[in-house]
Amino acid sequence: MTRLTSQMSWMSGEVLAQADTAGAGQAAGNAAAAAGDGAAAVADGAAAVANGAAAVADMARDPNLLIPNDGSFWLPGEASVGAGNVDWLFHALVWLSIVCFVGITIAVVYFTVKYRARPGHKPQPSAHHNDVVETIWTVIPALICVALFVGGWRGYVDLSTPPKHALEVQVTARKWSWEFVHPNGVKDSVLHVPAGRSVRLVMKSEDVIHSFFVPDFRIKKDVVPRRYTQVWFKAEQPTITPDQEIGDLPTDEQVKVAFVGDKANKTKIASQQGRRLFCTEYCGRDHSMMKTRVVVHNPGGYDRYLAFKQEEQDQMPPLERGQDVYARLCFACHTVDGSARVGPSFAGVFGTERTFVDGTSVIMDENYIRESLVNPQGQVVQGYPPSMPSFQGQLSEKEIDGVITYIKSLK
Ligand code: CUA
């Protein structure tokens, strides 16, 4: 059950919760059986499963859960206009496969038993040609294949053709974070979009191949260095209530805690936060950290978000600007608590001596931080891989000042 839940971690919260509670029920049942009372154990297990189901039902009614857990065993709930195109095709393929697999397996077993070699059994003559049967088993599968192709082709064309006048958001993927830049220049690590409006994402990568994936929207597209790829979607339901807009959203720090918290809590906060967004192309050590959310706003909420963010980013004091850049770009590789991740921690390093792989060393000052951001391969600190991308042209001078101020502040 644990393996199932981890494999299907993209499934809807309800299914996850059901799998978990069913697992707990089984575990309770097994433990009691080991104690010796088999019948009671089965009853206990059943009771635990029933309790689990009740808990799931409670969760579904929770008014704080803005995204209904309406997924199936196979797929999370549909949350974009084009999702239905993908789902019927997926279900058609799954059920066709199941029917064929079961049918063929039964036939193989049946014939193996019926015609097995045994004393007194003579080989029987078999037909080597039958026009009617052969026509049927050629024409029907051919028609099914054509229907699947036409369905898939239409869905593909639809997915690859963004409507004109779609809202355009620029996406940058890098090891290991996402950055979204809106038409008015607002940058964020979380994708905010309005409900009921087509959104076109123009995506590029700064290093290796990443892949943009929002399971609830059924969209997935590789993000490739040195070229642009695009994907579009139209989300129907807002993922936040009007009074939650901007101010009341949990901070990135809280979300990070929520993502590593216990499973029920994690599912709940992640759902409140928006649709889950993953990198789904293995892109290096912290590939699994490369995830964020899509917050879908109520009418007017997206514009309020943009205005709020723009003002915030224009007026931000250097320290906060530095924190903002850190939360968007640095946190996947650098901690602020002294522990090493991919790169050294930012805590307590300002003014200390840095020793590089070539044996030279320098005292960390403002110029060193600036140099590390624009030309990170120039001075690679001993004991760490040379994996930092350059932020030349990516960060404004104001943002670089912010990062310097922030690192200085971390004693
Ligand atoms: Cu980026 Cu995996």
Image (cartoon, grey):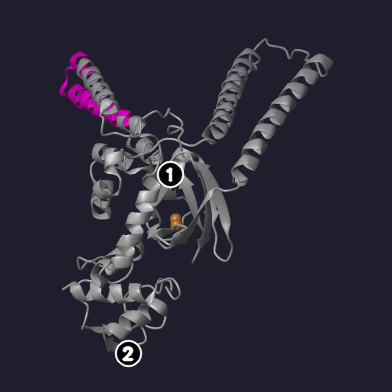
Instruction: Find out whether residue 23 is within the magenta segment.
Output: yes
Ligand 1 in which quarter? bottom left
| Residue 63 drawn at (x, y percent) | 26, 30
Which element carries disc 1, helix, strand or loop?
strand
Query: Height in image: 305 above or below 123?
Result: below
Q: Which of marks 2 and 1 is in front?
A: 1
Residue drawn at (33%, 64%) of the image: 313
Q: Residue 360 carries which label?
A: 2
In this picture, residue 114 sits left or right of residue 210: right
Disc 1: which residue = 194
Magenta span covers which residues?
Answer: 18-42
Along the line of sight, which residue is nearer the eye, 354 or 358?
354
Q: Quadrant of residue 214?
A: top left
| Residue 101 drawn at (x, y percent) | 58, 25
Query: Height in image: 272 above or below 288?
Result: above
**Mark before the other along the chain sequence, 2 or 1:** 1
